[in-house]
Amino acid sequence: MAGNSGPLSPRAKLAVTAGKAAAAVSRAAGRGSGSVIGGKVALKLDPDLLARLATHLDVVLVSATNGKTTTTRLIAEALRASGPVVSNALGANMPAGITSALAGGSDARYGVIEVDEKYLATVARDVAPKAIALLNLSRDQLDRAAETRMLAEKWREGLAGTKAVIIANADDPLVVWAASSSANVVWVAAGQEWKDDAWSCPSCGGVMQRPGDDWFCGECGFRRPTPSWALSGDYVLDPHGSAWPIHLQLPGRANKANATTSAAVAATFGVPPQVALERMYQVQAVAGRYDVVNFLGRDCRLLLAKNPAGWLETFSLIDGPPAPVILSVNARGADGTDTSWLWDVDYARLAGHPIMVIGDRKLDLAVRLEVAEVDFRVCETFDEAVQMAPPGKVEVIANYTAFQDIRRRVGN
């Protein structure tokens, strides 16, 4: 365990107090949790506050394009077997939100922190993590995020020389390239369903060869490392070859992969796989994701999909036809304003489902579905879409701000 930092300085205490006050005002005004504005105020008063708050914690950082909020939650549950945990469980994953989260964890032993991909190196420098989990990299928010190869390079440069143990997905070439600059890497075979961002070698630009689950570059020799942890069906295989059953309430192969990485992280902190996986079963939903809510007399399952890789995984979770599906897409600041990614999603996989389309960019989505030759109906509101849905549980798939809109409407 990291050494205790002792009491905060008067300046740091003032920053924490001011940040909490700003957050409280934001909540009272109905503007969300207030964690971001609270963190911004606190960091303005003490720019080094994040580092000060993390001094007494054993920290693990979690970063990826998809799955980081869920994996952060699973790791936090696993580590609670060994001591108190502070975490930014609601997904405020930039420095201000992380600072707010840590400000509430003075008695914690562990800090389990989700980090936006662009801020990973910065936050790692501030909080001196013991472990960093890297899950995947794929295209997302093309108008503001770097191209994936550039992002992998930033990770690689930022993590070079780190003392942290890197727990990295051996099946994602971009993640392997990023992690390979580090001295201590634990490789996990977590799988990679979406491969469209990993056909060129991140080391030399050559064409990647992908025989089966393996991958390598025929030009420079960059290749998949041998994993020490692996997802195998419904089991986690540990470095000793033991198979541990995965029992989750969260659906889908992607969450089994998240659990596998989480077990590897927990082991770094001394929590055995059996204990870690048993604790993960307690997680039923993550910030509204996977919740089933009753609205207008209908059961609606809420699913978040923010980018092509996320939509691909989500399509594998929903009930088959004729289960009704509501699709909602916005393009606000938090989503990225570029909707060209819609053309990278294979919406033909929804054939046979009754589909209702809503959201700020419902017409963009309607054009995409028209081209995919999928039947759909455009609706003005979520209420209308639910009322128009044929009988059965309604699968609701939405990108980030559309998902939050729906959660507020259903009181979730």
Image (spheres, helix red, strand yellow):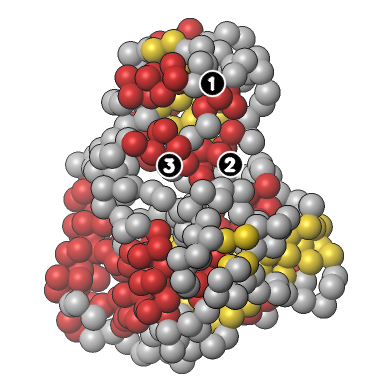
Residue 213 at what x, y percent from top left?
71, 58
Which amino acid lies under the numbered mark 2 shown in the image of this protein? Glu
Considering every residue shown, the one lying at the far front of the view is: 219
- Judging from the image, what secondary structure is the residue with disc 1 in? strand
Q: Residue at x 59, y 80 (%)?
A: 185
Measure the C-alpha gap from mark 2 to mark 3. 11 Å
Q: Is residue 111 visible?
A: no
Measure the C-alpha gap from mark 2 to mark 1. 15 Å
Question: As rendered, which of 336 and 224 lies closer to the eye?
Answer: 224
Which amino acid lies under the numbered mark 3 shown in the image of this protein? Lys
Which amino acid lies under the numbered mark 1 shown in the image of this protein? Val
Q: Report the disc number at residue 313.
A: 2
| Mark 3 Cα shell of 10 Å, populated few (<14), some (14-19), many (≥20) | many
In-image side of 81 versus 199 (left or right): right
Considering every residue shown, the one lying at the far left of the view is: 45
Residue 36 at what x, y percent from top left?
26, 57
- Judging from the image, what secondary structure is the residue with disc 3 in? loop
Task: Name the quadrant of the N terminus.
Answer: bottom right
Residue to which mark 3 is pinned: 306
User: Where, by quadrant of the figure, is residue 92 drawn?
Assistant: bottom left
Residue to which mark 1 is pinned: 325
Measure the C-alpha gap from mark 3 to mark 1. 16 Å
Question: As rendered, which of 217 and 308 lies closer to the eye?
Answer: 217
Marks 3 and 1 close (CB-CB < 8 Å): no
Residue 65 at what x, y percent from top left?
45, 55
In-image side of 127 versus 231 (left or right): left
Marks 2 and 3 close (CB-CB < 8 Å): no
Q: Residue at x 19, y 84 (%)?
A: 10
**114 versus 360 height, above or below:** below
Task: Name the quadrant of the C terminus.
Answer: top left
